[in-house]
Amino acid sequence: MSVEIKGLNEECGVFGIFGTPDASQLTYYGLHTLQHRGQEGAGIVSTDGKTLYQHRDRGLLAKVFADPTELKRLVGEAAIGHVRYGTSGHNSIANVQPFLFRFGDGDIALAHNGNLTNAVTLRQQLENEGAVFQSDSDTEILIHLIRKYINEGFIPALKKSLNLVHGGFAYLLLQKDRLIAALDPNGIRPLCIGRLANGAYVIASETCALDIIDAKFVRDVQPGELITIDQDGLHIDHYTRQTQLAICSMEYIYFARPDSIIHGVTVHNARKRMGKLLAKEHPVDADIVIGVPNSSLSAASGYAEESGLPYEMGLIKSQYVARTFIQPTQELRELGVHMKLSAVRGVVKGKRVAVVDDSIVRGTTSKQIVQMLRNAGASEVHLLIASPPFKFPCFYGIDVSTRSELMAAHYSVTAMCERVGADSLNFLSIDSLVKAIDVPDVGDAPNGGLTVAYFNGKYPTPLYDYEKGYLKSLNAQERLARKENVR
C-alpha cells in the first residue's frame, strides 16, 4: 500500500448523552459546538430503551436538521451524534455517522473520531470471511469484528475487537439501554466525560460541548479505557492496560476550540504560551503583531505580549466560510483563502508586520496571506509559525496522510520563505511546543505525553498498512534516524 493513497482519514467530533428526556436536543447543541471538527455530514441516533432512531445527512448540522420534525422524531433519554469530515471514499450518505446496525440480537449505533492504521488489512480479512461493508469508512470495521466474536458476549467481543484495531480512535456506541465509549491506548484523540445537574452523563470530543449544555466536567477518558453508562450509572473498565499517553499535539495547535480543556490544559493558554516562546526564540524587527484568525489569535497575543510589540487586528475573517485546512480539495482550499480572509489596509499599510500563524501544512494559506498583506501596503511581512515544521504525515485522523503535500517535507526554511514570499520565516521548536502545552502528570511519557510525530517522524504506534509507503517517502538520513528510533 502506498502512503500516497488517501487513507480512511477523518477529523470528526462525537457527542453522547445518557439519562435525560431531551437527549437529542442536547446532542444537537453539543454537535453545534463541535461543528469546527467537521462540516461534511452530521447525524444523531437516539434510543427510548426499546428502539434506536436515526437521522443523518450530508452538510452542516443546521442543514441536516433544518426540518425541526427530524429532531423531534429522535425520542428517548439517550443519544449519540457525530459531525464528519472525511478525506476518503465518497462524500455519500453511506459514510455519514452515526452508523446504525440492526441485528436479531439487538441494534447498535456507532460514531468514531480517528483513523485506523491497519484498516486495509482488517477489511480485507473480514471481507474474505464473508463480511459485507455498507460504507468505505474504517469506522465500520469495528462492528464486523464485534459480530465475529459476538458468541463470547457483547463486552468480551468489544474488548477483543478494540485490541485488534490500531491507530488513533475515540468510539461511541449506543445500544437500547446503554452508552459505551472507548479510547485508543495512546489517547491520541480527545474524549471527556461530563455530568448534568439531573445526573445524566455526557461524553464529548471537547469540553466546549459540555459547557454549552451546562454539564460539569468530570474527567478525561484515559487511554485504553472502556466506559459504560447505563441506568446504574457510570462504569469504568479497560480493554487494555498497555497504554502510553500521546495526545495529538495538533489538537492544541489548531483543531480544538480555544475554550476547550484537554487533559488539564486550556487550549487558549497553551497557544498563548506557544506565542511567548516563539517570541523568545525568534524576535523580529517589526512595528505590529497580527494573528491569522481564528486559531492563531491566542499565539499572536502571546507573541505581542512577550515581544512588547503592539497587537493589532490586521486580518479579518468571514465567519461564514469553512476552515480551509479541512477543505477536501486543493482548489477549494485556495478559493477558501480568498473568501475567508481580508487584510485591514488602514492597519498594515506602511508597517513592518509580524504575522503569527499556527502552522504551515501545504503552504496555500501562507503564500496568499503574505501577498494579501503586501497588496494592502505592508512594507515587510515576517511570518512566524507557532509550531514546528510539519514534515511528516498524520495517520491518526487528520487530513494529511501523504507526505507529498507537506511543504516542509520538501523545502528548507529558507526555501519555504522564498516560496511564500515573506521577508523572514521562523518556526517554534519541538522542545518549546512541549513546554508550552505542558500536560500535567504525564510521568515518563515521551514528549510530555504528546504526539509530535508530524515534526520529527517518531510515531507512537506502528504504522501497519502505511509503513511501506511511508518508508519510501523518506530520504536516506530520515530512514537512518527512523531505524535508530525503532531500535
Image (cartoon, rainbow, N blue to C red):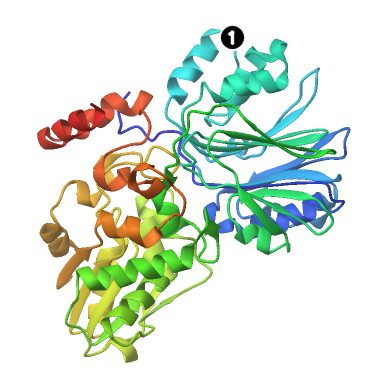
Which residue appears at 30% of the width and 81% of the height? 289
In the image, farthest residue toward the top = 129
Q: Can residue 196 be seen in the rendering of this structure?
A: yes
On the rendered structure, is 426 left or right of 452?
Answer: left
| Residue lying at 73% horizontally and 64% vertically, measured from the top left | 214
Seen from the viewer's position, the closer of residues 144 and 245 is: 245
Q: Residue 417 at what x, y percent from top left?
A: 15, 64
Residue 209 position in % (x across, y down): 64, 58
Q: Is residue 269 left or right of residue 423?
A: right
Give the camera-side residue of 439 and 203: 439
Residue 116: image x %, image y %? 47, 31
Rendered residue at 80%/50% (across/down): 200
Give the quadrant of residue 174: top right
Q: Is residue 188 above or below residue 287?
A: above
77 shown above or below 4 = below
Dividing the image into 4 quarters, which one contains the C terminus? top left
Q: Amino acid at mark 1?
A: Gly
In the rendered image, residue 126, in percent from the top left (x then y), is placed at 54, 14
> Relative to 98, is 409 on the left or the right?
left
Q: Which residue is mark 1?
A: 130
Which residue is at a point 20% across and 74% down the rendered structure image? 382
Q: Is residue 62 visible?
A: no
Q: Quadrant of the N terminus?
A: top left
Task: Say few, some or many: other residues with alpha carbon within 10 Å of mark 1 (under 14 / 14 to 19 / 20 or more).
Answer: few
| In this rendering, position of residue 377 left or right of residue 163 | left
